[in-house]
Image: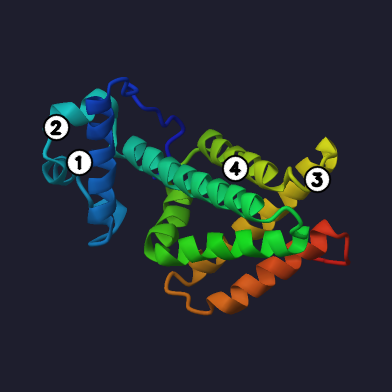
Amino acid sequence: MKNPQIQVRRKPRQSRAKLTQEALQDSFVRLLHERAAHDITIREITDLAGVGLGTFYEYFSKKEDLVALTIHRHVKNNAEDLKTYAQSLIKLSTDMALDDYLRQVIHFQLEQIQAQQFLWAQTFLLERQISNIESYRKSYKMMMQMWQNILAPFIQDAGQLKRMSLNVQRVCYGFVSQTLLMEPEFVEWDELENDIIQTSINLIFNKNVFF
C-alpha cells in the first residue's frame, strides 16, 4: 500500500477551497471510525463531505494522498497545541525548573493523545502504510522544531538544544507510537507517562540510561 510519490495536486489558496479540502479530510476520519482505511472508497468520502468526485480530483490524485495530508495535519495540529501550552507555562511562571516544565508539557501531550487515542493509533499505523520517507522526515523535522521551540527558554547552546530536542522526540514518539501500534486500546497511561518523563529527564540531565 506504500506509494513512492504522495503529492497534493493543487494547494487551496482561497478560504472556500481550503474548507473543501478540510471537509474531505474530516470525512475520511469519520469513516475511519467505522472501518479500515483500505475499505473506504473515494466515493464514500466525497458523499460524506458533500462534494463531487471531480472536486476530490482537483486536489488529490488518489486516496493515499488525502490520507497522507490528513496524517500531516493531525501531527501539525498537535505540535501547535503543544507549543501554545508550553508558551502559556512560561508566561505564568518565570522561575519554573526545567524538569517541572518538561513534566507538565509531556503530561499535556499525553492527555491530548489519550483523548484521541483511536485516531492516534490509526495515524501511527497509516503512517507506516501510506507515508513515504520524505513525508515521514517532514513530520519528524516539524516535531523536532517544536521541541526546540519548547526547550529554548531553558537551553541557550544551539548544539545542546538540538541534541536534547532530538532525544525528547525520540522518547515521546518511540514510546507512544510503539505502544499504540501494539495495543490500540492501551489503558496504562499513568505508567507510560512516568516512563516517558523519567527517561526524558534522565537524558537531558545526562543520567545513565541505556536502550
Label drawn at residue 163: none
Depth check, mark 3 against mark 2: the one in front is 3
- Tell me, for residue 53, which label it has, or none: 2
Q: Residue at horizontal 38%, vertical 64%?
A: 118
Q: Position of residue 207 (x, y in %)?
A: 88, 65
Q: 73 or 40, which is in the foreground? A: 73
Q: Which residue is mark 1?
A: 42
Q: Amino acid at mark 4?
A: Tyr
Going from the N terminus, do you reach mark 3 or mark 2 first? Answer: 2
Q: Quadrant of residue 122?
A: bottom left
Q: Amino acid at mark 2?
A: Leu
Category of crowding for the residue at label 4, using alpha-carbon neighbours closer than 10 angstroms: few (below 14), some (14–19), many (at least 20): some
Q: Which mark is residue 140?
A: 4
Image check: 34 left or right of 92? Answer: left
Q: CA distance from mark 2 to mark 4?
A: 32 Å
- Frontmost of labels 3 and 1 is 3
